[in-house]
Amino acid sequence: MTLERLYIYDTTLRDGQQTQGVQFSEAEKLIIARTLDDLGVDYIEGGWPGANPTDSAFFEAAPKTRATFTAFGMTKRAGRSAENDDVLAAVLNARTPAVCLVGKTHDFHVTTALGISLEENLENIRASIAYLVAQGREALFDAEHFFDGYKDNPAYAVDCLRAAIEAGARWVVLCDTNGGALPREVHDITAAVIAAGIPGERLGIHTHDDTGNAVANSLAAVDAGARQIQGTLNGLGERCGNANLVTLIPTLLLKPAYAERFETGVSREALKGLTRASRTLDDILNRVPMKQAAYVGASAFAHKAGLHASAILKDPATYEHIDPALVGNERIIPMSNQAGQSNLLRRLSEAGLKVEKGDPALGRILEEIKQREAQGYSYDTAQASFELLARRALGQMPRYFEVKRYKVTVERRKNKYDQMVSLSEAVVVVKIGDKKRLSVSESMDEHGNDRGPVNALANALAKDLGPYQRYIDDMQLVDFKVRITGGGTEAVTRVIIDSEDREGRRWSTVGVSPNIVDASFEALLDAIKWKLVRDGAKAQ
Amino acid sequence: MTLERLYIYDTTLRDGQQTQGVQFSEAEKLIIARTLDDLGVDYIEGGWPGANPTDSAFFEAAPKTRATFTAFGMTKRAGRSAENDDVLAAVLNARTPAVCLVGKTHDFHVTTALGISLEENLENIRASIAYLVAQGREALFDAEHFFDGYKDNPAYAVDCLRAAIEAGARWVVLCDTNGGALPREVHDITAAVIAAGIPGERLGIHTHDDTGNAVANSLAAVDAGARQIQGTLNGLGERCGNANLVTLIPTLLLKPAYAERFETGVSREALKGLTRASRTLDDILNRVPMKQAAYVGASAFAHKAGLHASAILKDPATYEHIDPALVGNERIIPMSNQAGQSNLLRRLSEAGLKVEKGDPALGRILEEIKQREAQGYSYDTAQASFELLARRALGQMPRYFEVKRYKVTVERRKNKYDQMVSLSEAVVVVKIGDKKRLSVSESMDEHGNDRGPVNALANALAKDLGPYQRYIDDMQLVDFKVRITGGGTEAVTRVIIDSEDREGRRWSTVGVSPNIVDASFEALLDAIKWKLVRDGAKAQ
């Protein structure tokens, strides 16, 4: 049986950016585009060229993607031709192979919000799409408020779609703009649209999660015949978010109801990168990944001992709807090291540490990780700190130096020009071999700005490490992430530091404490020690 | 037209407690039961009497509820009578008016996990339910793994339901135990079960969110004829969680497709307490409420200025699927660099600030917001800091006090027991009227942990604000978010602090600096000043 093709359209970079507090930098947009392309989505909507400087810059440095790179805009305004609409011109200037234009299909919005006649709106759609096609672009039409529009005036709503299709649109996309539609409505209206002559293989669906049904609404539209799904990574998006592609993609690939009927651009191999893709976006947003997220959450395959405990131990699959490895996730069975050991062996070998299966050190390492994770540590990304922990447990960690004490002061007061200024100063006392070394440092950057206590501590620590100095001279702190997280019963601060050296190596370390300075210092120390280990420094 | 009755069954206290890391105390269970009862659910499942000491204690001090208080357990084991099953006896000893027993319906689990014959399992169901009924209890049967079971052996799965119904069960509940079923399957299988003779008005649905469809699956079962929905507050539950009643209840009450056909025990008046009910559970779990939660999230009715800005300002309802007040939530129109004057006017009026259209202060405020956003500030969520900024520009900000200087020290060294410990100490000098006040404070919590420089500063600042002291005594810092962001050419630290007072008001403030301590201090100061303004404190 031949499979039908389903197309996946990602709008993380455009509609996802409508989320409160989210504004991607150009560099972040590039990372996200790369992540999406590795996953295998069909379309990447990059933003709205001309709407803000970042979007414009991103399109200028357009990434090379396998996916069809798409610019977003709106249909031309009334009273001017498509050729003379400056907003549309900015969108076309981005020179993307595809362009998606949003337009009205709800008669109420046409007459009230736009204040134009229903026919004028049809003409705006027709002319805009025809203009895209004439310019050699693949044209998509986002039918705003489609479901509400259809409920009020079905004939007009379908006329809008037909205008776009007849003008040459590859896709017309039914948008549930305010997120209020329910699965059965979406199914029935999509089916009615197809019955009215709009071909299902040119029909897309764009949903929002305001009733918790964004995923189900997308599936309902596919059930009814739509063949393109629009959504975002992690369901990012305005209000309650867009349809979550991270949830939809594995359902489409792994559930027989869809897998046996459809194929997508996402391969089973790429699907294994799904959990990582989801976490990448969280990292960029500095968000704590949602533990209960479907498929990719840290708890998605976590089984709490209880009613199911013995059945899970006999055969975990009895309580799992899919194998977590298929989406790059892991099973968590509390009180059982069984599942953990092979995973641990893999991470150790990645760190260049050879340990035999069955070595009692493995149990000790797992136990320590468990204890530290309960305190708030996380070794998901902090691979360098994981390596140090393992080396200590294996007796393979040199004793380079010991920090005897430190003190850091931040003072804010008026300077002689009567301006409020800050000054941070740190003293660190380190013992190397038998020798004690005191270092003191401020935290002033080249612009004369005080960069705070963590920077002062890093400077003091790096100032005089005696025999180790040459190893750390090229180290640089490139990112610093802070999260408040649960550690036992109290909130603690988790700091993750990314460091880099001249060779371009990049490594992450973690520190945890109720005190943010302590947590940072711990991560700093790990960063330095990892560098010493990796560069083969000998303990004094 | 008469409305059909839909029943809502809450299992937050039982299945919700299966969540990783969740273990309610008896007192917490009481608060949750009260919250559920105020909302108007029909059944409150309190736990599994005999399974753990807390559950047993909770049933002993059983709360008086309008809802039918229900104990959970499992069907009797094979080889003994219902009367002689000690596990079942413990459940009955809780003396609840209703008892819900889980049992197998998937033939594979019967023969593999239980290791008994299919007929023995039917007899266990029959005898257990009959025993409950004989004891005068309302009996419910949770059909474990029902959908998987039905797919493998539909006749047997339905036989299990029929055994329970014939033995007198008020309800048989179709459970998607591993969360893998999809809405269409749930609909079709539920319809088939009814066609096979199980009455819809005795049929319930119990779903999990492993494919992001728990809510849609519940609705699909209702569409097919089921009349009881099981779920939890905030979708709490093992792995990805259970069906979220906080999402389902407003859909059932407000969406015509359900509201015009069904009535529930939840009144429109009680629905206004939904947002508060959801936050109550988060408070108990010490979780930050999910901003994007459907209906009740802080972002659920937040509109980011942009494409929709002008339409929202004309009529917010055009971009809202329901009126947020119906569920006790609020509309938010945040500031953003794309915002225009009319948007600003609305924000000002929400803050209780009257400004005329065309007032030159509006331009000044917009300009300052733009400048500060370029430095790294963000006023999307930090509404309280926005209000203070506007008040300053309008000359409506009292000069309460001035911070002349501060100094904070973090020291880490060995204590007399040779353990490394930290100590943070802050000195703050504040001028109120003509009077200078010095305060000094450490940062030690009740467990003897040093909580760091920001906490020490907050303590020192709150220690002696003289005439303002009584206004800030009930203030509490509830969340603290840090991110590194671009400010001009340099990376800066942005700190957002959420504060709360005794009345449950919650407000967010922002601070930005290359120095994390400075940034935090700025956000702290804003938090205090907003409280003074809102409580009508008079400047000295």
Image (cartoon, coloured by chain):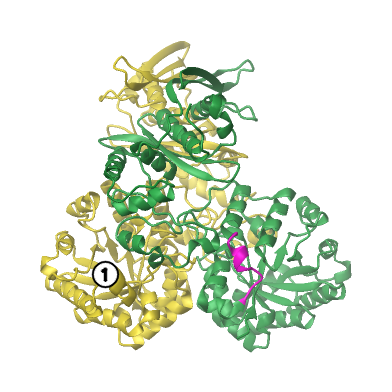
Chain colours: A yellow, B green
Q: Would residue B222 be found to the left or right of residue A3 on screen?
A: right
Residue designated by label 1: A114
Q: Residue furthest right?
A: B84
Identified at 64% across, 55% down, the residue is A304
Where residue B129 sits in the image (x, y, percent)? 80, 75
Left of B521 or right of it: where is A72? left
Q: Does residue B264 belong to the magenta stretch?
A: yes
Image quarter (top left, top right, bottom left or bottom right) of the N terminus of chain B: bottom right
Q: Residue at x 52, y 43 (%)?
A: A356
Instruction: Give the magenta-colored segment's residue range.
Output: B263-273
Q: Secondary structure at mark 1?
A: helix
Examine the rendered structure and indicate whether residue A54 appears above or below residue B45. Answer: above
B294 versus A159 height, above or below: above
Can you give x and y, in whole percent of width and height, for residue B314 in the image?
Answer: 34, 63
For residue B225, what is the image quadrant?
bottom right
| Residue A377 lies in the magenta-colored region | no
